[in-house]
Image: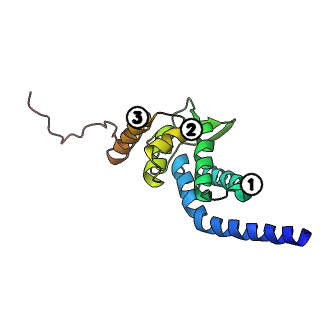
């Protein structure tokens, strides 16, 4: 009996290792996009990934037909949503639990955390609007609006008005 449990545990571990080998890279990229960290300096994203994989491993034997990737992605998104940072008074820094960290710098850094979360789920992960809304406790209309705004901001970033140069032409009045 004990040998059988050991063999089942080893099989479970091998299945999970195969899952991690196939899914960890994509999940890490999703987490990096969520945290808006640089791909080569992403400690918050790696922490999110570790927590999501740990949660998935703990549920591994109970998944029974559920997609483990979906389980890990849901945990990653919900965990991120529950730890959304509040802006720090200083322009280029944020505080979370007393620790300072650099301002977001990734490709989605111009978006707010909720916008990043919805955009990553909808566009990068391909999660349906209704599923995203249910996962985050929002209406589908809210998800649609936030996703549209985030997409627009990524495709057409707002540029700060800079000083005009001496050679700039002024439109006639």
x 18%, y 42%: residue = 167
Circle 1 crowding by C-alpha within 10 Å: few under 14, some 14–19, many from 20: few
> To which residue does mark 3 refer?
141
Q: In the figure, is residue 113 to the left or right of 158?
A: right
Q: Is residue 97 visible to the viewer in this orientation of the structure?
A: yes
> To which residue does mark 1 refer?
58
Q: In the figure, is residue 25 to the left or right of 167?
A: right
Front disc: 3 or 2? 3
Q: Tell me the SS state at disc 1.
A: helix
Q: Nearer the viewer, residue 164 or 171?
A: 171
Please, which residue is most extreme toward the top here? 173
- The first of marks 2 and 1 along the sequence is 1
Q: Tell me the SS state at disc 2.
A: strand
Tell me whether circle 2 and circle 1 mark residues in contact (CB < 8 Å): no
Q: Tell me the SS state at disc 3.
A: helix
Q: CA distance from mark 3 to mark 2?
A: 32 Å
Q: Is residue 38 visible to the viewer in this orientation of the structure?
A: no
Rendered image quadrant of residue 171? top left
């Amino acid at each position: 009996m004990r040998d059988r449990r050991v063999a089942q545990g080893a099989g479970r571990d091998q299945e999970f290792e195969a899952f991690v080998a196939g899914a960890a890279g994509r999940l890490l990229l999703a987490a990096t996009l969520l945290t808006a960290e640089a791909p080569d300096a992403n400690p918050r994203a790696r922490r999110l990934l570790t927590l999501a994989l740990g949660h998935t491993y703990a549920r591994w034997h109970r998944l029974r037909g559920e997609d483990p990737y979906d389980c890990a992605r849901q945990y990653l998104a919900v965990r991120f949503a529950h730890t959304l940072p509040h802006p720090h008074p200083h322009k280029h820094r944020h505080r979370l639990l007393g620790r300072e960290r650099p301002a977001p710098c990734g490709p989605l850094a111009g978006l707010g955390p909720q916008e990043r979360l919805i955009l990553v789920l909808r566009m990068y992960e391909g999660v349906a609007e209704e599923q995203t809304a249910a996962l985050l406790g929002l209406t589908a209309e809210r998800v649609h609006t936030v996703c549209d705004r985030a997409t627009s901001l990524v495709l057409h970033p707002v540029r700060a008005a800079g000083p005009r140069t001496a050679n700039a032409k002024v439109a006639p009045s």
